[in-house]
Image (cartoon, rainbow, N blue to C red):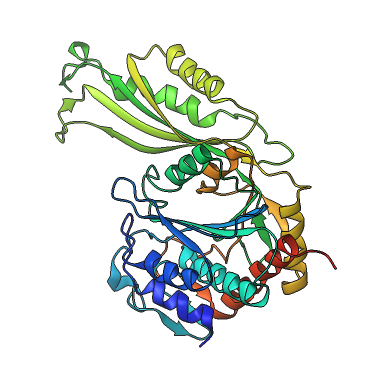
Amino acid sequence: MSDVLKLASELISRRSLTPDDAGCQALLAERLEKHGFTLEWMPHGGVLNLWARRGTRPPLLCFAGHTDVVPTGAESAWTSPPFIPTVKDGVLYGRGAADMKGGLAAMTVAAERFVHAHPDHEGSIAFLLTSDEEGVAVNGTVKVIETLEKRGDKIHYAIVGEPSSRTVLGDEFKIGRRGSLTGRLKVHGVQGHVAYPHLADNPVHRTAPALTELVSTEWDKGNAHFPPSSLQIANINAGTGANNVIPGELSVEFNIRFNTEWTVERLQACISAIFERHKLNYTLDWNLSGLPFLTRSDGALVDAVQIAIRDVLGVETKPSTSGGTSDARFIAPTGSEVIELGPLNATIHKVNECVGVEDLDRLAAVYERILDLLLLEEE
């Protein structure tokens, strides 16, 4: 069993349902401390966070990731217990195998190997670990970054180990993400008897045309770096549970993933204008969970990633901004060059989540090659 597979298995065996870390960070911290990393624990609001750094000189390369996982769903639907790591036909199964305990294991082993081979390397290496990525994400990476910013600790390069590959390891890596804005709409009507509609005001009927316009609007066509912005309705709720009562209120929750064609303020104004045109009596609350960000494609980190993937995997990789949000959105505003690079994302959050055993070892080799390119002096 390889070092990466062994460590990934040990992490999977810890039932770290968000925001519980279940001992994962302690396991990684013990290994990192043996290789000269200084540990700094930064708990916030019941969430465990770890900042581990080796070295004091710039540039600082940070591996970032989360130890928490999403719920398993019905465990009976899994072919093997989700928290008992199981290898079958060269594939490791278990919750978090791809998202992202496999990536964490590969990062850790890569750093260990690099430090062992180059104890006097240039610059510094850090790990930023949280157990709050799969949940509300308010006490994790964002809090660590706030602390680092206040004291002037500058991350120059950040590699987030999220599963980024599409069909084969290394075929894509993320250089940015769209922003995420959620709207919580309440439309107010008048409750009444379905047989006397003239004495009521049905908010479902009033809102339907507005929602039709909302979901049929083409917000933009995307741009050179981002796909089009996309709005989806996530939840609709109305009614009292009886089929003879006109509801007095309708609740709608929607989310828009938006690119750099928009500011938050302009997007909110355009959406609100739809509800105004349809003369709804409504209240609307907003939650912004992340702004769009883009890492410069001609920077040192992107260059190193492309070279490392080509050297180790023989793949010509593609920079991408597709997919959901990640904790990279909290690191990018500091001015860091940030990318996401990890295993295949085909099974994340699914029953029978898995990762190829060979892919784990090859991913570790890619991470180690990136360290070579960024933290070793050219000969």
308 or 324, which is in the foreground? Answer: 308
Residue that sits furthest to the right in the current view: 379
Q: Position of residue 267 (x, y in %)?
A: 54, 24
- Percent across and percent down for residue 80 are 35, 79
Residue 305 place in picture, x, y as percent: 71, 60
The total number of labels drawn is 0
- Residue 373 picture quarter: bottom right
Q: Quick one: 207 or 124, which is closer to the camera?
A: 124
Name above or below for residue 289 compared with residue 200.
below
- In what quadrant of the picture does the C terminus appear? bottom right
Q: Residue at x 16, y 16 (%)?
A: 196
Q: Based on the displayed image, in which of its 4 quarters is residue 112 positioned?
A: bottom right
Q: Residue, x 55% and y 71% (percent of image)?
A: 106
> Residue at 46% of width from left, 42% of height from top?
147
Q: Nearer the viewer, residue 253 or 210?
A: 253
- Residue 95 visible in the snapshot: yes
Q: Is residue 131 above or below residue 334?
A: below
**Drawn side of residue 67 relative to residue 170, left or right:** left
Residue 168 in sight here: no
Q: Position of residue 139 (x, y in %)?
A: 37, 44
